[in-house]
Image (cartoon, helix red, strand yellow):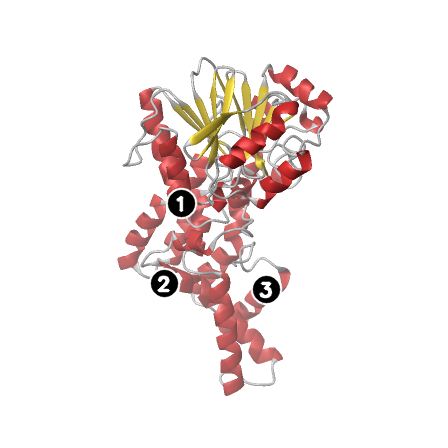
Amino acid sequence: MAKTIPIGTDESRRDRYAVARRQSKMSARRFIGAFLITSLGVCLMHAKQPIEDEIQDVWTDVDRIVAVGSVHGNYGRFVSILQTAGLIDSDTNWSGGTVHLVQTGNVVHLGPHSRRVIDLLMKLQEQARAAGGYVHVLIGNHEAMNLTGDLRYVNPQEYAAFADKHSKALNFRFFDPEAEAWKQNDAETQVDNPAGQMGQRRYKAFREKWVADYPLGYFEYRYAFGPDGDTAAAWVTQILASEPSTKKKVFDDLRKTKRYAPWTLKQNVAVQINDTLFIHGGISPKYASSSLREINETVRSELIDRAKFNKGMAVDPEGPLWYEGLGKGSASETHVEQLLKQHQVKRIVEGHTHTPGTIMPLFDGKVLAIDAGLRLGRMAFLVIEGDKSTAVQGSKSVEIPSDSGKLLAYLKESAAMMYRVPPELQAAIKELE
């Protein structure tokens, strides 16, 4: 798995770059490469990319809402759910008319095909609007991690999706100054000369580790999801300046991928549709008095400003991307009632907390947790029409109870609709019996 920080940012490595530059007098191209390696991730964090002043976060008079939890790169199952819900046709084009689709965040990480999922959502957003519908894609904790360089959960195939015929050459532009610094350091500190047999073996091990840590597509992935596209593009142009014949082609190919970060930053963390509030995590007592507009604008601003992000709402365990008190049922009834009154809604739908494999009602149906495990292939989604909330499991459906006394019967009916009942759901049923 690739490292979670851009290479060359620790103090010792900066010292090795300094030594290498003094002793070997790197070429201009290699110096630019070292600068890019050291600075790429840091500068992406500090990007001040403007976003729209006001992004709508409240909708009314919507007849039908379909909500889907975390996708985590499972493109095939996500498409199956959208087709089952009648939202897309066999060519994956919007067929949902005026329906509002809410995807509650965590499109990326863990699974292999997040880029395909995002491309589909981008297309559907345009098509749905043209048809009078809407596609809401909420920012989840994994989107925030992606934008700020925390890549612990990136699936290797997510990197590979951004690799092309230029990737190997681009990787070597980053590798060259690292290798030069390593050789200088090895020559000074090791008994064996790097040119000798022992040195060659150490160099081979160093190179193999580097290639494993930064696979093809890694730098393109960082470029695609880094907020500051113009700066990164300028660096890529500089580093390829010594090869004018390939510079334009590589830059053009990279620029096509630069839509992902700006698109993510235009999404909301929470939205209200009719009398339902949708959010990725939840609203804890700490932020109970915050409006949806305040939550959305605060998180978006933090994602493009590292100074705000480090200690802000977006990384706070009690913040809207991480809070699980609603989804786990550990919040107080008083807090839930306060939120409903504050936002003038009847229910809250959250998509961060893993459920036993179906839509999980809590607090007498006032909170619905919908991350049923799509990443694992579980086909559950939520439909809201008027006052009726329905859990759809594959091609079958069951009405979600608003009375905790009916929870056991609901879970048993949900289990009966499944081809294979998850162990977590079996345990939940047994606990209630």
Mark nearer the viewer, 3 or 1 = 1
Where 87 sits versus 167, above or below? above
Q: CA distance from mark 2 to mark 1?
A: 22 Å
Q: Is residue 311 left or right of residue 203?
A: right
Mark 3 vs mark 1, CA separation in Å: 32 Å
Q: Mark 2 belongs to which amino acid?
A: Ala
Q: CA distance from mark 3 to mark 2?
A: 23 Å
The x, y position of residue 242, in whole percent, is 34, 61
**Residue that mark 1 sits on:** 115
Percent position (x, y) of residue 342? 64, 16
Q: Which residue is mark 2?
A: 169
Q: Is residue 130 visible?
A: yes
Q: Is residue 315 left or right of residue 334?
A: left
Q: Report the mark closest to the observer, 3 or 2.
A: 2
Query: What is the quadrant of residue 176 in the picture?
Result: bottom left
- 100 vs 263, nearest the viewer: 100
Q: Residue at x 44, y 64 (%)?
A: 30
Q: Amino acid at mark 3?
A: Arg
Neighbour tally class for label 3: few under 14, some 14-19, many 20 plus, Cα within 10 Å: some
